[in-house]
Image (tube, rainbow, N blue to C red):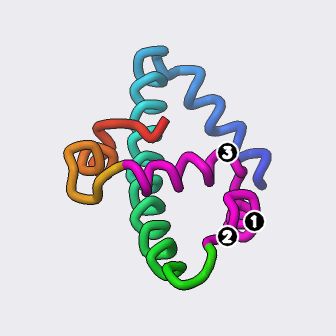
Amino acid sequence: MIERMFDTIEQGMAITSTADLLKEIRREERKISRHRARQVRLLRELQSRYLRTPSPSAASLAAELDMSTETTRALLETATRTPEQSDRMAQLESGEWTFD
């Protein structure tokens, strides 16, 4: 059953123009950015709870979140360096800017 699903997807892609595929990839990247913005907000809240205790390392937090250490570090850096009420954060949340 799953194999047939992928066959259908691949057949649909074969008749889709390159321009439309690029648009779809950009749309998906905007969705990812909106999700990353939400993760940044959640990490800010998590960090605020460590005021009296040491924050976990990026590596241990990555393991806890089942994410790569690189992505976790990037999210933590964004949470620390991007003001919550800023144009950059608003653009990330809207998907206008990508997380990468």
The reply to whether dot 1 and dot 2 touch (C-beta < 8 Å) is: yes
Task: Tell me which segment is drawn in magenta.
Answer: 55-81
Tell me, yes or no, whether the highlighted magenta stretch contains residue 21. no
Q: Is residue 11 above or below residue 5?
A: above
Which amino acid type corresponds to the residue marked 2 in the rendered image? Answer: Pro
What residue does disc 3 label?
A: 70
First of labels 3, 2 by sequence position: 2
Instruction: Give the residue drawn at x 76%, y 52%.
Output: 2
In-image side of 68 versus 81 (left or right): right
Residue 69 drawn above or below residue 60: above
Which secondary structure class fits the magenta region best?
helix
Among the two numbered marks 1 and 3 on one chain, the one whose residue lies closer to the N terminus: 1
Please tell me the numbered disc located at residue 60: 1
Q: Dividing the image into 4 quarters, which one contains the N terminus?
A: bottom right
> Which residue in the structure is indicated by mark 2?
56
Q: Please tell me whether residue 68 is drawn above or below residue 27 in the rendered image.
A: below
10 Å crowding of disc 2: few (<14), some (14-19), many (20+): few
Quadrant of res 96: top left
Given residues 12 and 73, the one toward you in this image is 73
Q: Residue at x 24, y 50 (%)?
A: 90
Residue 65 location, quadrant:
bottom right
Is residue 19 shown above or below 7? above
